[in-house]
Image (cartoon, grey):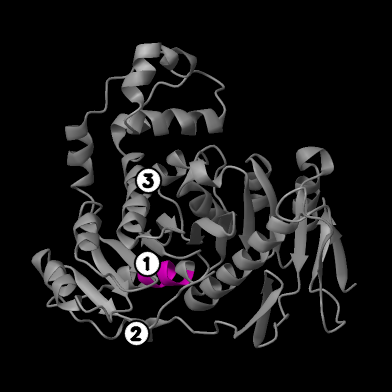
Amino acid sequence: MNELELKYGCNPNQKPSRIFMKNGADLPIRVLCGKPGYINFLDAFNGWQLVTELKEAMGLPAAASFKHVSPAGAAVGLPLSDTLAKIYWVDDLGDLSPLASAYARARGADRMSSFGDFISLSDICDVSTARLIKREVSDGVIAPGYEPEALELLKAKKNGNYNVIEIDPSYVPAPLETKEVFGITFEQGRNELKIDENCLSNIVTTNREIPESARIDLLIALITLKYTQSNSVCYAKGGQAIGIGAGQQSRVHCTRLAGQKADNWLLRQCPKVLNLPFVEHIKRADRDNAIDNYIGEEWMDVLAEGAWQRVFTEKPDVFTVQEKRAWLDQMKEVALASDAFFPFSDNIERAKKSGVQYIAQPGGSVRDDDVIACCNKYHMAMAFTGFRLFHH
């Protein structure tokens, strides 16, 4: 089959819609369940490329959680600490497989943004991963295969309408890619840039020490940015993205957005948040919303309205600005990557507030010296990769 008709394009008024192979070859995918749409396939194919590269670079199963053609989270399958298992709502699932751990991390990085995501898995979907997926709100999944029991679990999701896509892992796309905008065809070579340890060899700061764990996080951040709508910035720690800023016109706004998401991830691990007194049987999405409100500036409004009674058995103490700052000031060893150079040192100043100590960026700004000096002020280590990762 070299063509698949879709319900509609990006919006219901955009018809007809299809995916197809121009050369007459068969599509490298099979739809095993559901009827994926135009945006589903954009997320699936971008996510598949991302997890494939993560797996190749790290030698570990990888997963990504995509929304609107950018990742909300991406990770490799490292074991979860008790704290991470709790904030990702998987502490009741027992031991997770490496692939399930990768998805728990990818989903848990920014659970608000991952609500209704499209999932990409680097490896055959096992039962452990399927059980985790089955209970989350998600549009679909793409993987190179599915264990029989895992497939049955996924087929039962959404009353049998959950989108399950199997992709041929041996498929290699053509070296040239095209797309049409306003009836005009654009053509370019695929971005086949290989991201590996060599990308981090040009360290330009006084501090030249980047430990192995930070190198892994920087590579994860760079590979994630390769498939994130630009401008984009990614914070990473412990084998996963923890804050992704995408599609911002200003780089410092992108750094702030990604930093705010990273801060939320860090604050969720604070005992004051871990011990919130939720009412029994509250849904995971409602818990996520409540935590987001509790961490954010809206909490005083929630208190004033008495809305806390819907989610908590008793009114929690206010999480003060001073308490949040004190917790974040303990955070260290965070990695940060940018898809293009930092034009001003304000990006570094913002990154410092989220515990960033290691940075990878292309370099090449007329103010590189200012950016390097700012890194030196905070004893950060920064590598110039020499390449840009714009993605549109």
Q: Nearer the viewer, mark 2 or mark 3?
A: 2
Q: Relative to 10, is 210 above or below?
A: below
Mark 3, residue position: 265
Judged from the image, the secondary structure of the residue bearing numbered disc 2 is: loop
Mark 1, residue position: 217
Look at 49% across and 53% down and name the residue there: 105
User: What type of secondary structure mainly makes up the magenta span?
Assistant: helix
Kind of residue indicated by mark 2: Gly
Range drawn in magenta: 218-223
Quarter of the picture containing the C terminus is bottom right
The picture places residue 194, in percent across and down from the top left corner, at 49, 84
Quarter of the picture containing the N terminus is bottom right
Give the number of callouts. Answer: 3
Kind of residue indicated by mark 3: Trp
Q: Earlier in the sequence, mark 2 or mark 3?
A: 3
Gap in Å between the C-alphas at discs 2 and 1?
18 Å
Q: Relative to 22, is 181 above or below?
A: above
The picture places residue 275, in percent across and down from the top left corner, at 35, 28
Whether residue 303 is visible: yes
Judged from the image, the secondary structure of the residue bearing numbered disc 3 is: helix
